Amino acid sequence: HFSTFFLFQTSHSPVEPHSRVMLFREVLGRSLCRSMERLVEVEQEYPGGVEYIFSPACVPLWRCAGCCGDENLECHPTLTRNVTMQLMRITPTERTGQYVELTFVEHQTCECRHRKMHLNESSPRVRIHPRRRKHRKRSKDCGKCQHPHS
């Protein structure tokens, strides 16, 4: 039956009876750029599979994360590997599912690298007025392509 493909699990973070203060060195060491296990949505790695539902919906992958100590730097992978996992691919319209193997990229080692400049972060540019475009023939059935007339 369709609903048997979904398993629900709850987990709780470990609770210590007497919580201690995490010292600066440990906080710093645990916050620096490194590879750590993260839950990543399958849909994020395999976009466009809207006709299917994957179970589980997210998978544990080692990915680079953490702070670099300089806002001009960000954490990037230096060594990656492929890992293949078996998931259930469910077709909701047919109420069927089958096991599939999907390959994901894991980050093995990481380092801080200079951020790539994005357009909105780049230095101000001199604005040049665009040239007027000549009227082009447009397909009659392409409503999205046509600009509204003023």
Image (cartoon, rainbow, N blue to C red):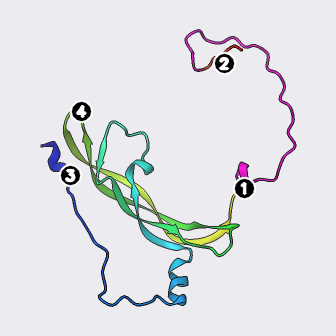
Q: Where residue 14 appears, x then y in whole percent?
A: 30, 79
Q: Earlier in the sequence, mark 1 or mark 2?
A: 1
The residue indicated by pointer 2 is 147
Residue that carries the numbered disc 4 in the rendered image: 93
The alpha-carbon separation of the residues under discs 2 and 4 comes to 38 Å
- Amino acid beneath label 1: Met
- Which callout, 3 or 1, points at the residue further toward the start of the chain? 3
**Circle 2: residue type:** His
What distance separates the C-alpha of mark 3 from that of mark 2?
A: 47 Å
The Cα–Cα distance between marks 4 and 3, rounded to whole angstroms, is 16 Å
Write down the residue under mark 3.
6
Q: CA distance from mark 4 to mark 1?
A: 44 Å
Q: Are the residues flagged by discs 1 and 2 in contact, CB closer than 8 Å?
A: no
Of residues 20 and 106, which is closer to you in this image? 20
Numbered disc 4: secondary structure: loop
Image point (21%, 43%), residue name: 97
